[in-house]
């Protein structure tokens, strides 16, 4: 967060619930992990998990579709993390065999 703020970005700590979502219709108010959120547009956050060592993505797939809370001084509503469309994560493998 400090480096993002030094670069002039609005960065905030984010509490997230990593694990099974309890109810698809209701955000979960319980959190077990801390990540970083950057506000690039008002009320819209790009989430980043700098603790994940197994992906080059900002947010690993284990953090998708999870309840999260951006810790802003003025408060914020609980939100659900973004799930990117499948076509952004597809890989095509072309092979031949005999």
Image (cartoon, rainbow, N blue to C red):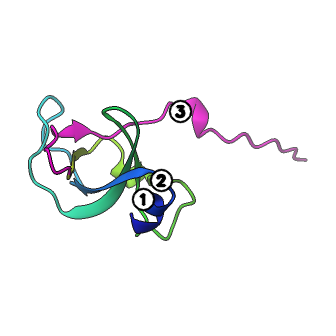
Residue topped by disc 3: 86
Residue topped by disc 1: 5
Give the residue at x 40% y 60%: 49
Of the 4 image quadrants, the one containing the N terminus is bottom left
Question: In the image, is 32 to the left or to the right of 11?
Answer: left
- Spatial CA distance of label 3 from label 2 is 32 Å
Instruction: Characterize the local packing of mark 2: few (<14), some (14-19) or many (20 or more) Cα atoms within 10 angstroms.
Output: few
Q: Which mark is residue 8?
A: 2
Secondary structure state at the residue bearing disc 1: helix
Residue 25 position, x and y percent, is 14, 28
Question: Between disc 3 and disc 2, whose residue precedes?
Answer: 2
Q: Can residue 84 be seen?
A: yes
Residue 41 position by quadrant: top left
Against 19, residue 50 (above or below) is below
Q: Are marks 1 and 2 in contact (CB under 8 Å)?
A: yes
Residue 95 position, x and y percent, is 83, 44
- Spatial CA distance of label 3 from label 1 is 31 Å
Against 88, residue 71 (above or below) is below
Total labels: the figure holds: 3
Residue 83 position, x and y percent, is 41, 36
Q: Does the magenta-highlighted stretch encompass residue 44?
A: no
Pick the front one: 34 or 24: 34
Q: How would you classify the magenta stretch by its main secondary structure?
A: loop
Give the residue at x 14% y 38%: 27
Q: Does the magenta-highlighted stretch encompass residue 77?
A: yes
Pick the front one: 42 or 56: 42
Give the residue at x 49% y 71%: 53
Q: Which mark is in front, 3 or 2?
A: 2
- Spatial CA distance of label 1 from label 2 is 5 Å
Q: Are marks 3 and 2 in contact (CB under 8 Å)?
A: no
Q: Which residues are magenta?
A: 72-98
């Amino acid at each position: 967060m400090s480096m993002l703020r030094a670069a002039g970005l609005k960065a905030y700590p984010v509490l997230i619930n990593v694990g099974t979502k309890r109810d698809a219709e209701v955000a979960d108010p319980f959190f077990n992990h801390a990540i970083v959120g950057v506000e690039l547009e008002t009320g819209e956050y790009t989430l980043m998990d700098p603790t994940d060592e197994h992906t080059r993505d900002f947010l690993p797939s284990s953090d998708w579709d999870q309840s999260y809370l951006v810790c802003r001084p003025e408060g914020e509503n609980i939100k659900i993390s973004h799930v990117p469309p499948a076509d952004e994560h597809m890989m095509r493998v072309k092979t031949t065999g005999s």
